[in-house]
Amino acid sequence: MDSSDPAIKADEPPVLPSAFSTPPLSERPPPAAPARIPFRFHGSAAEYFCIWIVNTLLTILTLGVFSAWAKVRKRRYLRGNTELLGHRFDYTADPRRILIGNAIVVVLFLGYALFGAVYPALRLLAIVLAVIFLPWIIVRSHAFNAHHTMWRGLRFRFHPSLSAAVVIYLLKPLLIPLTFGLYYPAWARDRFAFRIQRHRFGTAYFHFETTSGPFYRAHLAAGGIIFIGALVLGLWMQWLTNHNGGHIPTTTQTLPGFLVYGGFILLAKHYAFARLFNPVWNGTRLDQHRFRASLRSGRWLGLQLTNLAAIIVSCGLLYPWALIRSARYALESLELEPAGSLDEIARMGSSCGSAVGDSAAEFAGFDFGL
């Protein structure tokens, strides 16, 4: 009989795959990508307008004293409406400590303005003292704001290193004029690294891995925008001088040119922010948990131009609407890519000296408007 007879094939036992056989490479399922957790922003322009208008009026009526409470209310609202994994951030600062920081700044400025006019040596001394104390002010401000920011009941921390701050904010800036400004992007990168890497959340540490390349590209492009603005201003001034028969233009005549130049500066600022947002966040991680950012520069610039137009047309009343739009787009362009369970991040225990750290932050921590 023919071996291809169906009857013979029906009697043959089926061939089962071996338990140890390896499926073809094309049939293997692709590795699962880590789940990304988006940030959510629940702020409302109408709600924030009520907070903003009260803050503005009370700050004016109290000659600036209420500005400390206004700052806390603003930060508490914005952070309290930022959500990650179903939990919202919180800001617990005491406005009285911010008021102390504001008072110190005001007293130093008044002393500089009043006594410096009579005694020029005191003005020079005030500038020297301000430069010397700048690293300490920056460190204490970061420590204060980190200590009072919470998520899931855990506080952020900022490890204060005065020596590192002196290097970043006093010594490295000396290289900027020596390199004719070419070192500025690298210095900007170092400032980001200093601020990010010295933060921690519970028992987890932040790390910063972005190189100086994106900073050079962003700042060189922003510098080009400012240069074009300066060129437009120069051409405007030259045209006015020729139009006036060689006489110096009046302030009223030059005002449109300076407004246009200010617009170029604002455009350069937002362009640099948009170009650096993704590289900065993509190069930041919390232990092994990474961040992923997808902000689009064109959309951000369009957003800021419409915000500026709305603020000008409304005489400033649409500022809350503009702020909420910007915050929502920036936060919703950000995601967290966890490497494992976030429950492994625990509260700093007594062995880490958290009680001492909390007391030191409460005693010496002030906000100086940074």
Image (tube, rainbow, N blue to C red):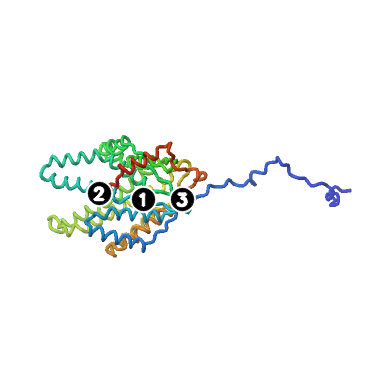
Task: State the separation of the CA atoms marked 3 and 2.
Answer: 35 Å
Q: Residue 335 carries which label?
A: 3
Label 3 sits on what residue type? Glu
Residue pictured at 29% horizontal, 45% vertical: 366
Q: Where is residue 152 in the image (x, y as percent from the top left)?
A: 45, 49
> Mark 3 falls on what kind of element?
strand
Q: Residues within 10 Å of mark 1 (few under 14, many from 20)?
A: some
Is 136 or 309 nearer to us in this picture?
Answer: 136
Between disc 3 and disc 2, whose residue precedes? Answer: 2
**Among numbered discs 1 and 3, the one appearing first in the sequence:** 1
Q: What secondary structure is found at the residue carrying circle 1?
A: loop
SS label for mark 2: helix
Q: Residue furthest left?
A: 118
Q: Earlier in the sequence, mark 2 or mark 1?
A: 1
- The residue drawn where x is 23% and y is 48% is 103
Question: Which residue reaches farthest right?
Answer: 1
Q: What residue type is labelled 2?
A: Asn
